[in-house]
Amino acid sequence: MSIMNKNRREILKQTTEVHRANIQKQLEQRLAAARAKGDRELIRILEAEASYLS
């Protein structure tokens, strides 16, 4: 494997990890807001989404 190909794979891996972390953080913020509002249906949906992502 060439060095350039290896670097591309590493960048893709890092980008994927950062993207997933950002999605998780945003989901946690949305869930906290739904809980603060007492929106049970939205909480249920977001918890299902969190389960799907883990």
Image: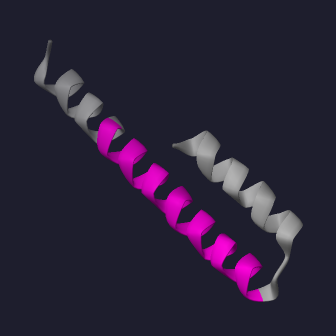
Viewer-proximal residue, 26 or 39? 39
Is residue 54 found inside the magenta-colored segment of the image?
no
The answer to whether residue 31 is left or right of residue 1 is: right
Q: Which residues are magenta?
A: 13-36
Q: Position of residue 18 (x, y in %)?
A: 39, 54
The answer to whether residue 1 is left or right of residue 27 is: left
At a point 30% along the width and 45% down the height, the residue shown is 14
At a point 83% along the width and 66% down the height, the residue shown is 42
Viewer-proximal residue, 38 or 27? 38
Q: Position of residue 26 (x, y in %)?
A: 58, 68
Instruction: State the quadrant of the N terminus.
Output: top left
Q: Position of residue 44 (x, y in %)?
A: 78, 59
The answer to whether residue 7 is left or right of residue 42 is: left
Quarter of the rendering containing residue 23: bottom right
Viewer-proximal residue, 5 or 52? 52
Q: Is residue 13 above or below residue 23?
A: above
Quarter of the rendering containing residue 4: top left
At a point 81% along the width and 82% down the height, the residue shown is 38
Q: Main secondary structure of the magenta part?
A: helix
At a point 69% along the width and 49% down the height, the residue shown is 49
Q: Is residue 41 above or below residue 15?
A: below
Residue furthest bottom as drawn:
36
Q: Position of residue 30 (x, y in %)?
A: 68, 72
Q: Is residue 22 above or below residue 15?
A: below
Q: How is the image coloured?
A: one colour
